[in-house]
Amino acid sequence: MKIKYMTAGILISTSLFAKELDLYSKDFVKYKGVDILNFYIPVEEKNKFRTYIDYEKTDDLDTITWNIGEGYIELDKRWELEYDVERKFYRGDANYRGWNSTFTFVRDEINTNFFGKSWDTSFVFGLEQETLEDIPFNFERYKLYGGYRFRTPLDIGMGGTYFGFDILGKKVFSTIEDGVSGEINLVSSTNLGYGFQFFNTIYNEYMSYDNNEGYRVGLESYLRWTYELGMDFAFAVEFGIDSDKYFGSTNLDYSNELYFLPYILYSHNFTQRFRVFAELGLPGYKIKENKAKSYDSNDSGIYYYGKIGVEYIF
């Protein structure tokens, strides 16, 4: 999924943390945390590492994702490194594999005030990697990027909303065609109460690479309900959409994905800093549509999903 780092700052599962922390202070916005049974728990540790294996099975394709490492490292009081390194394996009529990795350096800036709100502001720069191997030709794309993040809490929903936007410029190096990209993305995370959570990302990208000269508008949104079954288990139901529409002289027209997934979650702390986690789909249902100049595909059906991993904070 595309949506990442947006649960930070607002989804609290127990009244203990809500009493100890001022949810609307800059200190809280900068707090680190872990996502346990779909609820965000602030922690004092400044570094996080987790690794997991993710498996998804449909009628015509098996996708295995080995997340080698995901987390963040505090470099000093103002700088940190966020990282996410994935190795993907695809098994179907043809077998292929690839890399999806992101490395981002983040520097905290002085809070910015506009629209009557105080915004937590960060300068960011980093590298995105996307590759595919064992296809008719090996594909590689790297994006060097820089820009700013803005985040602020809002009094929307029983548990509040964490809202923000990113402004990014990117230099693209690609097997197909080098170029540039510019993005303005809106992000939000809302705790509606009674176990309901709502996440949204709106993507706005100017594209001038890979033989594209146009504009992409995307929406990734999902509504989730979670019910705790005990200390280590929970049940969740998730409904989501992931849609992109392309304008101008582009090779792509649109892509849409709708999914419904009920699943069981497991999380067990062996120590205060080390835990194991897992998810098991029950299964789910997915509808996918893709249209481009050279192809048009529609697919729907039941899919199976599972995940298991470990996490360490320090």
Image (cartoon, helix red, strand yellow):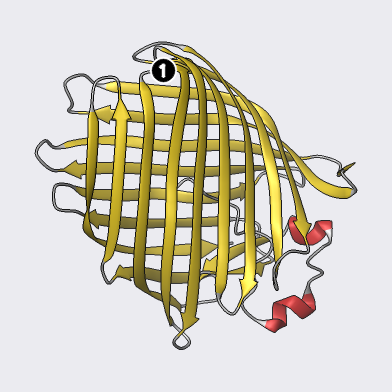
Q: Is residue 63 above or below residue 12?
A: above
The residue that mark 1 highlights is 250
Name which residue type carries label 1: Thr
Can residue 177 be seen at all in this image of the molecule? yes
Q: Quadrant of the C terminus?
A: bottom right
Image location of residue 281, percent across then percent down: 30, 68
Q: Position of residue 47 (x, y in %)?
A: 60, 55
Observer-nearest residue: 49 or 9? 9
Q: Which residue is at the front of the view, 306 or 104?
A: 306
Residue drawn 64% across and 52% down? 188
Q: Quadrant of residue 165?
A: top right
For the point 44% across and 82% down, which residue is it?
232
Secondary structure found at label 1:
loop
Measured from the top left, where is residue 164 in percent x and y? 70, 46
- Judge left or right: residue 107 versus residue 57: right
Query: Residue at 53% across / 36% down in the picture?
Result: 103
Q: Is residue 240 above or below residue 17?
A: above
Any part of residue 37 in sight: no
